[in-house]
Image (spheres, rainbow, N blue to C red):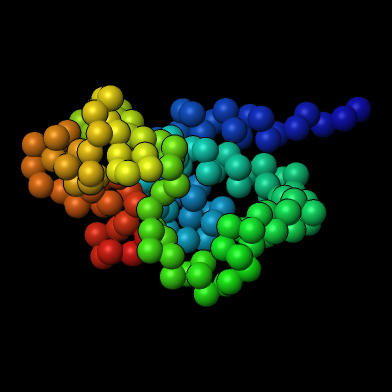
Amino acid sequence: MNKPDPIPARLAALKTATTPELKAHWRDLFDSEPPPFNRRYLESRLAYRIQELAYGGLKPETIRRLERLGEELDGGDKKKRGTRLDRDRPITGTRLLREWQGVEYIVTVTADGFEWQGRPYQSLSAIARAITGTRWNGWVFFGLKNRRGRT
């Protein structure tokens, strides 16, 4: 008789875990401190990591394909990968999620800035200020950098 797969139950348990529990899982699975991102991000990355450890990661041919695509984007210049001007900026179309005082806010990265509630913004800081009513570093508010300025 086959034993039932425990992975689906572990994934389902993430939904009911407290944030401190999710952070403890992160430390166990990644052997590092959890990033300052919102709960949904932690859940999705933990779910991926649980499955990766149980079933294996990307196939070698998939990794090679991704590397080839990266080379097409930067012309094979590995220096260019690390010195891109917008290196830390999320790619166009990325959705940033942030929970603030029990309300979830979603910002979309556009080609020339950001969009929130159907309105264009030049900076994440302007959106963070509109949400909170106080001055914030937008990159920190949305969890893209920690308070020490590291990504």
Which sits in the foreground, 20 or 53? Answer: 53
Which sits in the foreground, 125 or 50? Answer: 125
| Res 75 → quadrant | bottom right
Q: Residue at x 75, y 32 (%)?
A: 5
Q: Residue furthest right?
A: 1
Horizontal arrangement in the rendering, residue 122 relative to residue 17 (left or right): left
Q: How many marks?
A: 0
**Is residue 112 shown above or below 106?**
below
| Res 121 → quadrant | top left
The N terminus - image quarter: top right
Residue 148, visible in the rendered structure: yes
Horizontal arrangement in the rendering, residue 4 relative to residue 31 (left or right): right
Q: Residue at x 57, y 63 (%)?
A: 74
* Residue 27 horizontal/vertical position (percent): 48, 55
* Residue 23 horizontal/vertical position (percent): 42, 47
**Is residue 36 shown above or below 86?**
above
**Is residue 94 shown above or below 81?**
above
Which sits in the foreground, 37 or 118? Answer: 118
Residue 39, visible in the rendered structure: no
* Residue 98 horizontal/vertical position (percent): 31, 36
Q: Residue at x 57, y 28 (%)?
A: 12
Q: Residue furthest bottom?
A: 79
Q: Residue at x 42, y 53 (%)?
A: 34
* Residue 151 horizontal/vertical position (percent): 37, 60
